[in-house]
Image: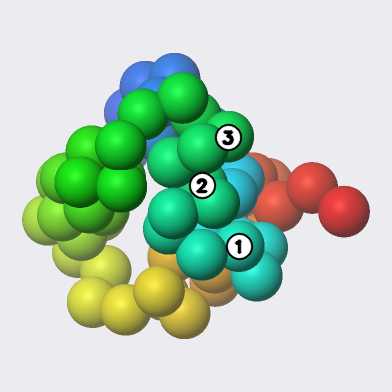
Amino acid sequence: MLVILVITWEEEFLIFVATEMRYKEIADCMFCSPRTIENYRNILWDKLEIKTRVGFAVYAIENGYYVK
């Protein structure tokens, strides 16, 4: 079984990306630039082998990162 470790900014990003927030809004909440959010997204796309934002949402829900 493959275990993927997720660090703090990744967890925070996954929580926000599972919502309907735009990347600009996520950047504001995480106190960083939209470009940083794009970099986070790209790193996680590679790390988690996810191809779309919907994939992020599914991953977040399945792994307990989605908060109502």
Q: Position of residue 60 (x, y in %)?
A: 56, 56
| Callout 3 touching callout 2 (CB < 8 Å) | yes
Q: Residues within 10 Å of mark 3 (few under 14, many from 20)?
A: few
Q: Position of residue 20 (x, y in %)?
A: 65, 70
The kind of secondary structure element at disc 1 is loop
20 sits left or right of 13 in the view: right
The residue that mark 2 highlights is 26
Q: Residue visible at 16% across and 54% down?
A: 42
Q: Position of residue 57 (x, y in %)?
A: 54, 68
Reply above or below: 51 against 33. below
The residue that mark 1 highlights is 21
40 sits left or right of 56 in the view: left
* Tally of numbered tags: 3
Q: Earlier in the sequence, mark 1 or mark 3?
A: 1
C-alpha span from label 3 to label 2: 5 Å
The three-letter amino acid code for the residue at tag 3 is: Cys
C-alpha span from label 2 to label 1: 6 Å
The kind of secondary structure element at disc 2 is helix
Q: Residue furthest top?
A: 8
Q: Residue visible at 87% across and 53% down?
A: 68
| Callout 1 touching callout 3 (CB < 8 Å) | yes
Q: Position of residue 6 (x, y in %)?
A: 37, 30
The kind of secondary structure element at disc 3 is helix
The three-letter amino acid code for the residue at tag 2 is: Ile
50 sits left or right of 56 in the view: left
The residue that mark 3 highlights is 29
Q: Earlier in the sequence, mark 2 or mark 1?
A: 1
| Callout 2 touching callout 1 (CB < 8 Å) | yes
Q: Residue visible at 60% across and 62% down?
A: 21
Determine if residue 20 is in view. Answer: yes
Q: Residue visible at 60% across and 45% down?
A: 15
C-alpha span from label 1 to label 3: 10 Å
